[in-house]
Image: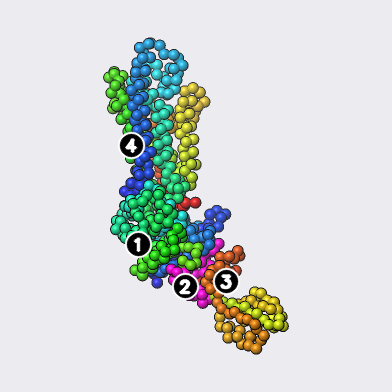
Amino acid sequence: MAYAVLTESLTRRYGSRRGIEDVNLAVTEGSLYGFLGPNGAGKTTTIRCLLGFLRATTGRASIFGLDCWRDSPTIKAEIGSIPGDLRLYPWLTGHSALKLFGRIRRRDIQAKGKLLADELELDLSVKVRQMSRGMRQKLGLILALAPEPKLIMLDEPSSGLDPLMQERFRQMLKRMAARGQTVFFSSHTLNEVEALCERVAIVRSGRIVADATLDDLRRQAKHEFEIVWADGAGERTAPPSFATLTAQSAARWVGSVEDGSLRPMLDFLAGKPVNDLRLARPDLETLFRRYYESDDEPGTAGPSPRDGANAASEVRS
Amino acid sequence: MRLINFGLLLRAWRETFGATLVFTIIIGSFGGLLSYALPRVQERFMSRGFIPPGLVQLRNTMMGVDSSASGVAEIAYTMAWSHPVIIVLLFAHGIIVTTRVPSGEIQSGTLDVLLGLPISRWELFVSETVAWLATASLVVGSMFAGSYIGSFWVKPESQPDWSVMAIVLANLALVYLLIGVCGLLTSVFSDRRGRAVLFVLIFAAGSVLVNYLELLWEPAKKISFLSVLHYYRPALILREAAWPWKDMAIIGGASLALWIIAGVKLARRDLATT
């Protein structure tokens, strides 16, 4: 399998400050890959290492088989990127930006840029200093996508775009992926990653805590249950060995069961005085919130290790 | 490996065009004015046959040599070409242009977009340097042009030999070059443009101060070799009509060494907006 992006134990420290630690990513060519994490988790640091802005403290990173630090200029000829906090020269207009960036890239990107501008409804004659945030973001996207790069690396690209434009932008990216271009999409918002990406890596506190397809992540989540007992029966009943309880009282049990334990759970409850029962996998939103919210070291909290940290190795193997 | 990128040159020129135009006009005009007025003032002093000792001392300080035996052209054009306003304006232009990359770009946040393009750090550095040198030739050249035009209204016997003035120009250009390279160096080592500017300003102001102090205060002579202006003596060039090879080699060599250090540092350092 050909990888567009491959990192092995990529670590970047800023003195005593945490950067990223032991990041392993494998992004296959032509895929739509989501890179999800809360603010300050290490997404931008990872992208900066991949783009050759920062040198890895240890580990290695490669794009299309080339070293991200040593071969950075060669690699970037195949990359279209947009930084998280986009700043463009205020004296540029859309037209002059396409000309200038084309000259720096040594290729003409004006025709393609104009098509993209039409699609994103951006007036290219306006100066950057007169543009709204959304307009600047559109111009940044156009400049990244116009060279038709093999790898599109986007750091929080939708910020500033209205929902309609976000949807149009997602459709553009899907079309590009269908043509074989790889999309590496960094975001802190689950919804946009869910709407676009096939596979997602979750980064928290500088470490990858999950790397799997969205379907796998859903599947690997434990079933959760909530039982409301009648007549305080919860106090008299012994919990079954296959269930893990997180809250237990005479009236109510809350917990989870491993896959394959649904039938035993239903058998266990048969004939018992149950007033109400909820038994389901958590939705993605809940799952991701747990990854985000836990303050403990990754892999030791939030969704169980099986849900998250180990999913990467499982899925990759 | 490609070292010059035309797009990067255009970008740098667009960014520095306004400042360069302003400096070119001011330096050219002021240089012209000095070259027009100073020979007349000097002629008047000499026709009177007496110059107050304090004024002679001030003149010697500005010229960096004993000027008692000097002629009108030597005194007037030395003072014009080493006038503090001209020196300060040239230094200011060099510092403004050379501290833009990378510290200015880091501070303005535009570096992430720039480095996301397929360019090497050396390509960026060399292109920036070439763009700067092109603007430098305009600014330094404007002093020569202004001075030449200003001298049209000066008596022929009070005009300098312009082939010798070209040597002064070359020497001044090297002084400007060293200050600019110091700007590149401090910019490469810093993430804050203000900090980079401050360090070069300290060096430049120190150079000017030591250059004047050494004629008035004996201990300053011991450290005068550290001043970039120590290697710029237009009076001696005009008097001897010879190339100051040693001075030019020292500032040229220092510029080259510092430029290489700056380039290597830029190629190796982490770069990203904060």
Q: Position of residue B18 (x, y in %)?
A: 36, 40
* Tag 3–tag 1 contact (CB < 8 Å): no
Of labels 2 and 3, earlier in sequence is 2
- Residue B236 percent coordinates (x, y): 37, 24
Q: Which residues are magenta?
A: A194-220
CA distance separating discs 2 and 3: 16 Å
Q: Nearer the viewer's eye, disc 4 or disc 2?
A: 2
**Residue beneath the point at 42% across and 50% down:** B110
Residue A213 highlighted magenta (yes or no)? yes
Residue type indicated by callout 2: Thr
Query: Circle 1 — which element?
Result: helix
Viewer-side residue, B198 vs B240: B198
Q: Is residue B1 left or right of residue A61?
A: left
Q: CA distance from mark 4 to mark 1?
A: 45 Å
Q: Which residue is denoted by mark 1 in the rendering?
A: A119
For mark 2, name the chain: A
The residue under label 4 is: B137
Observer-side mark, 3 or 4, equals 3
Q: Secondary structure at mark 3?
A: loop
- The kind of secondary structure element at disc 2 is strand
Q: In this view of the protein, can residue A237 be seen by the observer?
A: yes
Q: Marks 3 and 4: same chain? A: no
Going by the numbered disc 1, the residue's amino acid type is Glu
* Mark 3 vs mark 4, CA separation in Å: 65 Å
